[in-house]
Image (cartoon, helix red, strand yellow):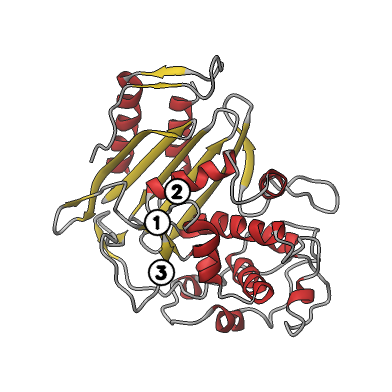
Amino acid sequence: MKRFIPILLLCCSLGSPKAQTLDSITLDKAKKIATDFLKTEHIPGMAISVSQCGKTILSEGFGFSNINTKTPVNPEQTIFRIASVSKSITAVTLGTLVDNDIIELNKSVYHYLPNYPKNNHDFTVKQLGGNLAGIRHYKNNKEFTLNKEMSISLGLNLFKFDPLLFKPGTKYKYSTFGYVLLSEVMQTAAETPFNKLVDSLVFKPLNMTHSFMEHTSETHKNITTFYRLNLLNKPVESKPVSNEYKVAGGGILSTSEDLIKFGNEIIYPKIISAKTRDQLTTSQRLNNGYKTGYGIGFSSQTSIKGTPKYFHTGGGIGASSIIYIFPEEEIVISILSNLSGVNMIPLGKSLENVFLK
């Protein structure tokens, strides 16, 4: 479903070298890339939204949110699981707590959770958010697909007695469970449930009216059906999963247009300070000085033009997603789909080549 006129004059500021005319040929190229990707990957439905200079320049739905009813994807209304892109939203929520002196990034996690099981080594909130604390990821597919409704606090029992994988700061290990622990730190320090923190500190201020936490027992209008591919590469409905306990790492629902609003917060920070934004998006380093390419909730790389690029991918049950943020070009690209197991980076890079030409 098309939502915007495909010929726009973009002007970030008067006389800015970033000002350009985005013609219909460029937008048609982007849409063809997306359509081809949808077919190649057998994706039932996908939404793509792109903004430049804070203005939406493309927002389009591809395919169906439900293949049985042939309900088309609407980028404004169709709600997807954003999977691990949730970590970026968690990071910005954390940033608001940092700015309000509720949490200090370099303090020990045990300062906020004194009763959390002791390990051989201490680790900080910053290390936890940067995947440097040694907290393990899922052991197996059974943990990944767990369909047991639990609170964040109860979810800690899945891993809190396990030893750290390494001495904090010596290695990088991506960990959704690390973000479960981070959310427990946040809600304990703020004395407010994590879900309410995200809603009041991020969703409402950014007018993300179609974004919320997934709850197994709740149903909402416009949520897509979630799919996986069978052995014949045909989409079939995924089995149910409970994401309540791991909401901070992969349990948020949103639209591609809401994620554009979120991405622009990184370019034009309003709810967090520029200083804190920079802490979230700057790559952390191991103890030996090696850059990990990950800050807190954001991967940090360079674009095809050699300029900064912040992004996060997501993969969940019935969901594959990505958000790209290019602060110098003032461009945000968000892509959401309703199929498990899709590598979204090739599509993201193809669209980067289109919009950063």
Q: Nearer the viewer, residue 138 or 311?
A: 311
Marks 3 and 1: in contact by CB < 8 Å?
A: no
Helix, strand or loop at mark 1: strand
- Find the distance from the CA under tag 1 to the CA under tag 3: 10 Å
- Lower sequence index among marks 3 and 2: 3
Q: Which residue: 56% across, 54% down?
A: 88
Q: CA distance from mark 3 to mark 2?
A: 16 Å
Question: Which residue shows up at 26% across the image and 59% down it?
Answer: 222
Mark 3 Cα within 10 Å, few/some/many (few <14, many 20+)? many
Return the residue at label 2: 259
Q: Is residue 36 visible?
A: yes
Image point (25%, 49%), residue name: 73
- Establish if 105 lies above or below 47: below
Query: Which residue is denoted by mark 3 in the rendering?
Result: 214
Q: Is residue 69 left or right of residue 325?
A: left
Of mark 1 and mark 2, the one earlier in the sequence is 1
Q: Answer with left or right where residue 357 lies relative to residue 300.
A: left
Q: What residue is shown at x 61% (from left), y 80% (from top)? A: 156
Tell which circle, 1 or 3, labels the residue nearer the N-terminal end.
3
What amino acid is labelled 3 in the image?
Glu
Q: Amino acid at mark 1?
A: Ser
Kind of residue indicated by mark 2: Leu
Give residue 102's position: percent from left, percent from top: 72, 66
Tag 3–tag 2 contact (CB < 8 Å): no
Task: In the displayed orientation, state which residue is furthest to the left.
Answer: 69
Mark 3 secondary-structure assignment: loop
* Residue 326 locus on image (x, y percent): 56, 34
Circle number at residue 254: 1
Instruction: Tell whether label 2 touches label 1 (CB within 8 Å).
Output: yes
